[in-house]
Amino acid sequence: MYIIDLGKLLPEFPKNMKIKKYLISGCQSQTWIALTNSVMPYNDLITLHGYSDSSIVKGIITIIFSLYQGLNLQEAVNVDIKPFLINQLQLKQNLTISRSQGIYLILNSIHSQAHSLYKL
């Protein structure tokens, strides 16, 4: 399955980020998502880190991260990629209900973390 193959492209998750703060509560699998940003002048691009013990979730994370690639913190706060993921890629039609809910949990975590950093 193509989504599982995409999951193999996900970079290694930093061990020091495998903490409760980044654990996605409510996911069927053990999933961590962490958002960081550089605080260099004129460059506040975000970096996303993700891990799951599920191969298909790793693939979903890879797809989600590709949509955020190149965004700065303000753009990450303001962008809504849910319609694209659900409608354009038709993930909802091709995933179980619990996996679809997992997508929302991952997106909510990214948005929440971006919003928290943006306030700083």
Image (spheres, grey):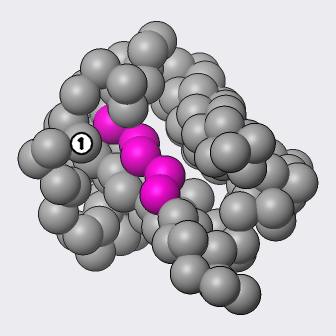
Who is closer to the viewer here, 84 or 47?
47
Q: Which amino acid, mark 1?
A: Met
Q: Residues within 10 Å of mark 1 (few under 14, many from 20)?
A: some
For the point 56% across and 81% down, which residue is it? Answer: 40
Give the position of the C terminus as an image quadrant. Answer: top right
Q: Position of residue 22 (x, y in %)?
A: 38, 32
- 25 sits left or right of 71 in the view: left
For the point 17% across and 54% down, which residue is it? Answer: 14
- Residue 73 higher or lower than 83, as above or below: below
Who is closer to the viewer here, 67 or 118?
118
Based on the displayed image, in which of its 4 quarters is residue 68 positioned? bottom right
Q: Position of residue 33 (x, y in %)?
A: 41, 42
Give the dominant element type of the magenta stretch: helix, strand or loop: strand
- How many numbered marks are there? 1
Quick check: can you spot residue 100? no
Q: Position of residue 24 (x, y in %)?
A: 42, 25
Outermost residue on the left side: it is: 15
- 97 sits left or right of 71 in the view: left
Based on the displayed image, in which of its 4 quarters is residue 69 positioned? bottom right
- 107 sits left or right of 52 in the view: right
Look at the image and give the residue range highlighted in magenta: 32-36
Q: Which residue is mark 1?
A: 17
Who is closer to the viewer here, 40 or 115?
40
Who is closer to the viewer here, 12 or 102?
12
Outermost residue on the top side: it is: 26
Q: Position of residue 114 (x, y in %)?
A: 66, 47
For the point 11% across and 47% down, which residue is it? Answer: 15
Give the position of the N terminus as an image quadrant. Answer: bottom left
- Residue 118 higher or lower than 72, as above or below: above
